[in-house]
Image (spheres, rainbow, N blue to C red):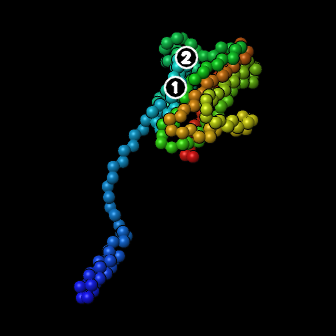
Amino acid sequence: MERRNFVLSIGTLAAGSGLALGTGAFSSVQAERDVAVTVSEDASAYLGIQPGDGPNGNYVDTTDSDALAINLTGDNDNVGDGIAGGQGLNANAVTGIEDIFQIQNQGSQEVELRVTPLAFGDVDWQDFDGVLGVLLVPQAGGIEIDLEWPPWESNFISISTLSPGEEIEFSLAAFALPETAVDSVAVNDEIEIIAEEV
């Protein structure tokens, strides 16, 4: 019997010590860990904003800060004076440019994507010499798109979710009227791209 009491006493002592010392509680911890963060250009960031895959991607240029910009002027070295000599859109015409740029979720979680505005315009009110309208058109394939309507009240699209690896392409439609619109109207604006975790 004595042996039993001795073993029981040792077991009780070990359990009590474990409770007193092994609770996992602590007063402070000091540790050092590595942090690695880089800033990437638009095309290789977690939310990739990049030119379209085809030749129309050349209508997208980079700004001085390496951000992507739609550039349908003679200043675009990809198509303007630098290569083909084009200077802008035709007057008295409707112009369509498919797959001009794309936005791809290159992160690790689903995001809701919003792009605003989708429509841009300019009117020469003084002499009514010209009207210019530009519309960005999302081409989503199987991705659900919610267009807010009327566009002049909200002027953005909301894509329910963009899963990792999914992308949405944007095309452009524009018109310039009448012939006197040449050099009388222009658009110089920005779009805002917002991606939030779902």
Amino acid type shown at disc 1: Pro
Local crowd at mark 1 within 10 Å, few (<14), some, or many (≥20)?
A: many
- 114 relative to 36 in the view: left or right: right
The structure residue drawn at horizontal position 64% and vertical position 19%, both measured from the top left corner, is 96
The structure residue drawn at horizontal position 54% and vertical position 39%, both measured from the top left corner, is 163
Q: Nearer the viewer, residue 166 or 151?
A: 166
**Among the two numbered marks 2 and 1 on one chain, the one whose residue lies closer to the N terminus:** 1
- Image coordinates of residue 197 in percent, x first then y, are 55, 46
Which of label 2 and label 1 is nearer to you?
1
Q: Is residue 58 above or below residue 160?
A: above
- Image coordinates of residue 18 in percent, x first then y, are 32, 75
- 184 relative to 26 in the view: left or right: right
- Image coordinates of residue 122 in percent, x first then y, are 69, 25
- Measure the alpha-carbon separation of dots 2 and 1: 18 Å
Quarter of the image where one finds residue 138: top right
Q: Where does label 2 land, which residue?
A: 74
- Image coordinates of residue 55 in percent, x first then y, are 52, 17
- 132 relative to 84 in the view: left or right: right
The structure residue drawn at horizontal position 56% and vertical position 13%, both measured from the top left corner, is 86
State the mark number for residue 75. Answer: none
Amino acid type shown at disc 2: Gly
Q: Is residue 74 above or below residue 165?
A: above
In the rendered image, the residue lying farthest to the bottom is 2
Local crowd at mark 2 within 10 Å, few (<14), some, or many (≥20)?
A: some
* Dot 2: element: loop
* Dot 1: element: strand
**Residue 11 in sight here:** yes
- 195 relative to 28 in the view: left or right: right
Q: Where does label 1 land, which residue?
A: 51
The structure residue drawn at horizontal position 66% and vertical position 26%, both measured from the top left corner, is 135
